[in-house]
Amino acid sequence: MTDFLTLILQQSVNGIYLGCLYVMVALGLTLIYGVLNQINFAHADFVTVGAFTAFFTATRLATKVLGMPDIAAYLVSLVTALGAGAVLGVVVSAAVFAPLRRSGADELRPLIATIGVSVLLENGQLALFGPVPYQFDSPLARETLRVGRIFFSAHSALVVAVSIAAIGALYAFMRFTFIGKALRAVAQDRETAGLMGINQNLVIALTIVIASALAGVAGALLGPVVVLTPFTGASLIVKAFACVIIGGFGNMEGTIIAGLLVGIIEAFTVQYLGSGIIDLVVFAMLLAMLVLRPTGLIAERKEENV
Amino acid sequence: MAAAPWLITTPYWRGILVLCAMNVMLALSLNLVLGYTGQLNLGQSAFFAIGAYVSTILIKTYGWNFWLAALAAIVAAGLVGVALAAFAVRLRGHYLAIASLGFAVITYQVLINWEDVTEGVRGIYGILPPVSDTVGLFYLVAGIAFLIYFLLDNLVRSPVGDTLRAIREDEISAASLGVHSAVWKAFAFGLGAAIAGLAGVFYPGFVGTLVPDAFGIIESFTMMAMVIVGGAGTMIGPVIGAVLLTFLPELLRGVGELRLMIYGLALTLVVLFMPGGIVQAWVAVRNRLRS
């Protein structure tokens, strides 16, 4: 019986850690959707760029050139990945989202345009880095910690810590700063916010940059634990969408809960059903959710004018 | 079109011709759903896969006649298309896009995991085309693509086409005028899926092998690039898009990733600067020349 309980606990811990990774990826998607009502399909590829940036920072630049110790180098790589994500956010905001917003395009055009960006980024990275997986050796991933009879890697503890810090910082930003308040105002009603003197273009650009920076950090956290190829992010995109939809599009709390839920369900699926069908289980959940409750776990009321 | 195999004589380029005819069929199939009915379906690659796998398995495992198997594959893809439309009835815009994307990924996972039937990632080998020489295959596929073009062209000019366009422009208003949008969406999805399935019937014989990787979601995106670059919601646009995006990367002698980089870039640039695709740009140029 205690073995069974240990197993449940162990898989729950694994699930929470996985869930934190998914939350980090999905949070940016939901943030952009909440403010803009649009999807950045290239979001997951920003994750990949973050992962490669972190890889080259941690294993080449910081250790080989600057001579930093392993752990410090990895922490520095989190910051450079954040920077890489933010830069991509600036570019995609200025080059894709802003022009389409000015031309008054319908909701699907930005999605299609960013699918193009996604295909471009994936295959651009394929041309640069090749299809052979990279071995991102993080010192923390090798370290195993033990609490009672539950084992986890130091890396997973870091993932959970960084996720909590990122979510906390985002919350504080949204609640307590003026720009955060402006951001929520734009999310609620763009036109009225504009009338109140809020520069909505700036706020929207900022939202995209923050979301993309989160994607970069998510990449740095994912890098050491996944098979790092140009398609690492792409393999996550539908799972990230699953989190966003299960949580209710644009709803941050819902996305966080859904991300943890998907992580835990994945951990138990691996334990009891095998790893081959994880995607099937998650997408069956996604489709069931779409049919039964398309508004997500936490519904937001929206009216439609004809 | 008929003269193409004489102008192009190397086997490699004749192969590209066959591929081009298949792409035209796929672009036409997606255009019915995306261009005319206005439903962003990212799952079209799944119907292509269903057509390919159902026909191949019926022929290789059960010894069916090619054309009988083709018919079964078309029906199977069409029925699954109608089933996907059950989601499209309830979902719009982004939600439908993601649901159909999920559907494509599930289909891909089933192809990989259901090894007893699909052979999984090992793939199915030694598949023979219905016509042994490339030129004959080209005439067959191009002829069918032409027939589909002709039929769809008549369809979109008919009141059915008006109905589909009404759903695209404003579904709620269309419903208030008595359009059963659920039925017509199911019709568009089913027909589009059946045509994609038909294209899939010819693919395995042409390549000789069948692996799940040929039907990843990137295939949905390349079809979408063809439709959008050519001009969604026009009949000739997707044909131009398919021909252009099949031949242009070949002319540049690109390897795989370069080809797809061009697709991605073309898709983004066209959406940004030329939302009606080549057809709309051509009309604009012609009007300017006239005035």
Image: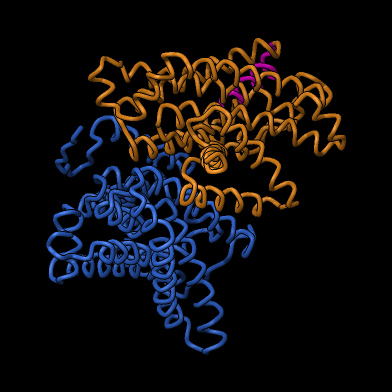
- Residue B105, above or below A162: above
On the image, the x and y values in percent for residue B73 come to 58, 18
On the image, the x and y values in percent for residue A262 come to 32, 47
On the image, the x and y values in percent for residue B275 come to 46, 44
| The stretch drawn in magenta includes residue B53 | yes
The chain letter corresponding to blue is: A
| The stretch drawn in magenta includes residue A160 | no
The residue depicted at 73 percent of the width and 33 percent of the height is: B207
- Residue B61, above or below B236: above
The residue depicted at 58 percent of the width and 29 percent of the height is: B236
For chain B, the rendered hue is: orange
On the image, the x and y values in percent for residue A140 come to 43, 73
Dominant SS in magenta: helix
Residue A204 or residue A41, whichever sits in front: A204
Instruction: Say if residue B271 shows up in the picture.
Output: yes
Left or right: residue B71 versus residue B161 is right
The residue depicted at 22 percent of the width and 20 percent of the height is: B176
Question: Which residues are the magenta region?
Answer: B48-64
Residue B201 or residue A253, whichever sits in front: B201
Residue A96 or residue A76, whichever sits in front: A96
The residue depicted at 47 percent of the width and 75 percent of the height is: A139
Left or right: residue A177 versus residue A92 is left
- Residue A58, above or below A37: below
For the C terminus of chain A, the quadrant is top left
Instruction: Say if residue B217 shows up in the picture.
Output: no
